[in-house]
Amino acid sequence: MTSKWSTRRVPLLIAAAALLSLLAALWFTHGSKSGPVVILDPARIILLRTAGGFLEVGAMEKVEEFGWSSRYTCPLVDCPDLLTPTISRIRVRAHYVYRLPLADEWKLELAGDHYKLTVPQPQLQAPVGFHTNDFEIQTVTSGWFSPPAAANREAVIRHLGPELAQRGSQLPYLEAQRPNAEKTVQEFARKWMIEQGKKASLPIRVAFSAPSPL
């Protein structure tokens, strides 16, 4: 009876062992899978070069929030109670980077007990980066005749880049990073003077040139 019981279960044991082997093979294949080799097609990319390069002088992170609203309109009459809006609100942690163009003229002059270094105004690097791990977006539709939520979310995401660039270029943002920008320029200028064999014993005071009129 014992031999007969074992014989009946041999096919089941073989099938179970084959299944376990297959699962193990799939597991190890998945775990050791490597990504494809990336080959950049020159016809499908755009390479940009800035003559002289940039000096990064400061960076700032700030949580930004703004909304986007869309609604239908009645062709002949005003009907705000019937055609209610769809509103999306976005919350994102933006990373603003400010830099100076090295190709522009930097004017260094001796002014009594210090050097005066006049440099261009820091420029905001665009597009502005942002963190995706804590990115939040919420959309509310308030009625049957509100625009679709998906379309409104797409609109607010499309306008995220221009909105961050506009905020990062405002005067309060520029003023907030100015002290760090001055220190970075001072360190850069002092190192350059030493490399050129010039005396760097006097302090360097940084002055940013007036922005060009639009």
Image (tube, helix red, strand yellow):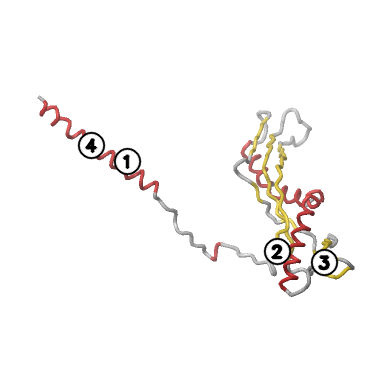
Q: Position of residue 142 (x, y in %)?
A: 68, 29
Q: Secondary structure at mark 3?
A: loop
Q: Nearer the viewer, residue 88 or 80?
A: 88
The residue where tag 2 is placed is: 54
- Relative to 124, say whether 119 is above or below: below
Q: Secondary structure at mark 1?
A: helix
Tell which tag, 2 or 1, sits nearer the viewer: 2
Is disc 3 surrounded by few (<14), some (14 to 19) or many (20+) residues within 10 Å?
A: few
Q: Which comes sooner in the sequence, label 2 or label 1? A: 1
- Direction from residue 24 to residue 159 in the image, left or right: right
Which amino acid type is shown beneath numbered disc 2?
Phe
Q: Which comes sooner in the sequence, label 3 or label 2? A: 2
Q: Position of residue 206 (x, y in %)?
A: 82, 62
Is disc 4 surrounded by few (<14), some (14 to 19) or many (20+) residues within 10 Å?
A: few
Q: Position of residue 163 (x, y in %)?
A: 73, 47
The residue where tag 1 is placed is: 23
The residue where tag 4 is placed is: 15
Question: Image quadrant of residue 3?
Answer: top left
